[in-house]
Image (tube, rainbow, N blue to C red):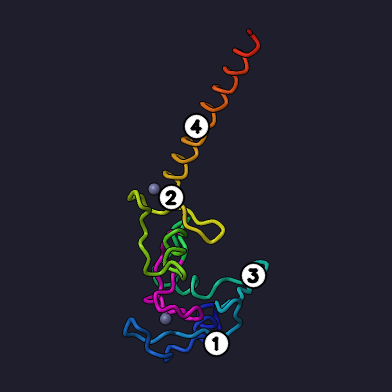
Amino acid sequence: MDELERFWSKVDKDGPVSSLGTPCWNWLGNCSGGYGLFYIIGGNGRYLMAHRVSYEIEYGTIPKGLELDHLCHNKSCVNPGHLEAVTHIINMQRRLPFRGQNIYCKHGHVFDSIYHGVRHCSICDRRRADAWQKANKQKADATKKRWRERQRV
Ligand SMILES: [Zn+2]
Ligand SMILES: [Zn+2]
């Protein structure tokens, strides 16, 4: 059995029909965190994410910097028609608790980073930091000026 045959022997193409109207192809092999793992024997032997393998068989190499989003929300599904290559930020935006929320900040920029579970807009973050620094500098300058004036007396 070659690697491809071995891969498809671990796939059940008659899974439940997803909201996309087509059945999920459930991975029958090992899983990690809900995602299927496919062991490649060639080379030094290593595990690959099964859904990534299936996507690459169908569409070719996943463009650098993109990750696969399960449109059917079934992590063990390897149906390439249920997978979309998206940027990390879009993938995160689509997940709970952000799913269905506005993807724009209140100034109309796309939220482009997430840390500590909170979405951020880097443009507004930078503006806020600049404004804070400016205000702080003005305050510091005023204090210095007052101090200098006092020294003169
Ligand atoms: Zn699916
Ligand atoms: Zn913004």
Tell me the residue that label 4 is attached to: 135
Q: Is residue 86 inside the magenta stretch?
A: yes
The residue that appears at 57% across and 71% down in the rendered structure is 48
State the separation of the CA atoms marked 2 and 4.
Answer: 21 Å
State the separation of the CA atoms marked 2 and 1.
Answer: 40 Å
State the separation of the CA atoms marked 1 and 3.
Answer: 18 Å
Q: As drawn, which residue projects farthest toward the right?
A: 44
Residues shaded magenta? 68-87
Number of dots carrying numbers: 4
Q: Residue 17 or 1: which is nearer the viewer?
A: 17
Image x and y of residue 10, in percent: 53, 86
Choose the circle earlier in sequence order: 3 or 2.
3
The type of residue carrying mark 2 is Cys
Residue 121, disc:
2
At label 2, counting other C-alpha atoms closer than 10 Å, the crowd grade (few under 14, some 14-19, many 20 or more) is: some
Q: Nearer the viewer, mark 1 or mark 3?
A: 1
